[in-house]
C-alpha cells in the first residue's frame, strides 16, 4: 500500500492518501474471496478426471503385477516396479495380506458425492463464512492503522516545513531576502533548511509492516524530495536574476557618469557641471562600494 502526497490546492495544507484506499482494499479482497470460491466449481470435474486417469494407471500396474506372478517372474522386482514397499517379502504373504498392502499403496479415497451446486455449498460452508468474516474484520482494523499512519506523516516536520516553503506565501517570504541587510544569508539559510529536510526524508524508513499490510513510503519520499529540489532551484534562479539585475544597475550608474565626464565640455558652464559631478561621484564611492559588496557575495555564493 503506497502513501501518496495530496497537494490539492483547495485544501489548506498538504494531505496524505493511500493507494489503494481502504474501500478499494476491502472491495478487492471481497472480489478475491468470491473468485476463490467461484473457482471451486471445477473441483468435481477435476476430481473425476484425476480419478479416471489414476484408475487407468493403477489397473495397468495391477495387470503387469498379475502377469508377472502368473508367469513365475521375479516378484520382488515386479513389486518394486509397482511402487510397493521394498522392505516387505510379498512372496511370503497370503492373498489377503497382499491385497491389504496393495490397498495401502494404491487404493483411491472415496469418490466425491454427486451433488449439484458445489460452489454454493462451499460459499455456505460455516468455516469458510467464519474465515471470510475474520479477513474482513482484519481489513476494517487496518483502517485505524491507515489513519494513524496518515496523521504521522501529515504532522511531520518534513511535510509541515516543506509545505510552508513551497506555498506562494513561503516562496515570497524567502525571495524577500534582497530587502535584508545580508540577503545572501537569507537565501543560504533557506537552502540549508531544505537540504536538511531532504536528508531527513531520505533517512526515513522505506516500508512499515502493519498486520498483513505493508505501507510503502518510496513514492511519497520521492515526491517530497522533488519538491525540495524545486524549491532550491527556484531560490537559485531568483538569486541569479537578482544578482544580474543589481550588477547591471550598478554598471549603468557608473557608465552614465563616465559617459558624461568623458564628453569634452564646450562651455564653461558644462565644465563646472562636470567638476561638480566628479566631486559628487567621489563622495558616492563609499556608497557604491557598499552596493558592490552584496553583489559580490551573491556571485561568490552562486
Image (cartoon, rainbow, N blue to C red):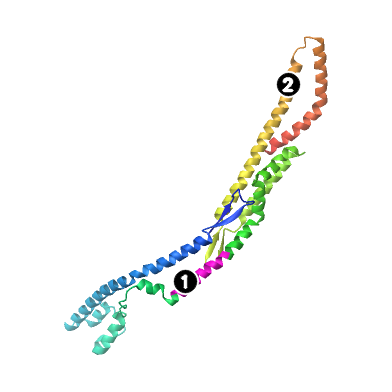
Element type where label 2 sits in the image:
helix
Q: Which residue is mark 2?
A: 256
Which quadrant holds residue 275? top right
At 38% across and 67% down in the image, what residue appears? 38
Residue 239 lies left or right of residue 289; in this view the side is left
Q: Nearer the viewer, residue 123 or 258?
A: 123
Disc on res. 84: none
* Secondary structure mostly seen in the magenta stretch: helix
Q: Is residue 239 visible?
A: yes
Q: Residue furthest left?
A: 71
Q: Is residue 210 left or right of residue 256?
A: left
Task: State the residue at coordinates (28%, 75%).
Answer: 51
Give the image location of residue 145, x and y in percent.
Answer: 58, 64
Q: Nearer the viewer, residue 298 or 141?
A: 141
Q: Is residue 68 above or below residue 153?
A: below
Residue 43, magenta (yes or no): no
Identified at 68% across, 42% down, the residue is 172
| Nearer the camera: disc 2 or disc 1 | 1
Classify residue 54 as left or right of residue 67: right
Please say whether residue 86 is visible from this viewpoint.
no
Give the quadrant of the C terminus. top right
Name the residue nearer the viewer: 72 or 112: 112
| Residue topped by disc 1 | 132
Magenta highlight range: 128-143
- Residue 167 horizontal/vertical position (percent): 65, 46
In 3D space, how far apart are the residues under numbered discs 2 and 1 (Cα atoms)? Answer: 85 Å
Q: Residue 70: image x %, image y %? A: 17, 83
First-in-chain label (2 vs 1) = 1
Name the element at disc 1. helix
In magenta stretch: residue 138: yes
Amino acid at each position: 500500500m503506497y502513501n501518496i502526497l495530496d497537494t490539492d490546492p483547495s485544501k489548506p495544507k498538504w494531505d496524505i492518501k493511500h493507494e489503494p484506499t481502504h474501500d478499494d482494499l476491502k472491495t478487492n479482497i471481497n472480489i478475491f474471496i468470491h473468485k476463490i470460491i467461484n473457482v471451486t466449481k471445477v473441483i468435481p470435474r477435476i476430481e473425476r478426471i484425476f480419478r479416471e486417469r489414476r484408475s487407468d494407471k493403477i489397473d495397468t500396474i495391477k495387470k503387469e503385477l498379475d502377469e508377472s506372478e502368473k508367469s513365475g517372474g521375479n516378484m520382488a522386482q515386479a513389486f518394486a516396479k509397482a511402487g510397493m514397499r521394498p522392505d516387505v517379502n510379498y512372496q511370503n504373504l497370503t492373498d489377503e495380506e497382499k491385497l491389504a498392502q496393495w490397498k495401502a499403496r494404491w487404493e483411491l479415497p472415496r469418490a466425491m458425492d454427486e451433488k449439484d451446486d458445489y460452489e454454493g455449498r462451499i460459499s455456505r460452508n460455516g468455516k469458510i463464512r467464519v474465515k471470510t468474516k475474520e479477513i474482513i474484520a482484519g481489513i476494517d482494523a487496518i483502517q485505524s492503522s491507515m489513519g494513524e499512519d496518515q496523521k504521522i506523516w501529515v504532522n511531520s516536520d518534513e511535510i509541515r516545513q516543506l509545505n510552508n516553503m513551497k506555498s506562494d506565501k513561503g516562496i515570497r517570504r524567502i525571495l524577500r531576502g534582497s530587502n535584508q541587510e545580508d540577503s545572501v544569508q537569507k537565501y543560504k539559510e533557506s537552502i540549508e533548511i531544505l537540504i536538511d529536510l531532504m536528508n531527513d526524508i531520505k533517512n526515513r524508513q522505506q516500508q512499515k509492516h502493519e498486520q498483513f499490510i505493508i505501507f510503502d513510503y518510496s513514492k511519497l519520499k520521492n515526491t517530497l524530495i522533488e519538491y525540495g529540489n524545486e524549491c532550491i532551484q527556484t531560490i537559485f534562479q531568483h538569486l541569479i536574476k537578482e544578482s544580474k539585475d543589481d550588477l547591471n544597475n550598478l554598471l549603468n550608474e557608473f557608465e552614465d557618469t563616465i559617459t558624461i565626464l568623458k564628453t569634452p565640455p564646450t562651455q564653461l558652464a558644462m565644465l563646472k557641471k562636470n567638476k561638480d559631478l566628479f566631486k559628487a561621484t567621489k563622495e558616492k564611492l563609499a556608497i557604491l562600494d557598499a552596493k558592490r559588496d552584496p553583489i559580490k557575495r551573491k556571485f561568490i555564493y552562486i
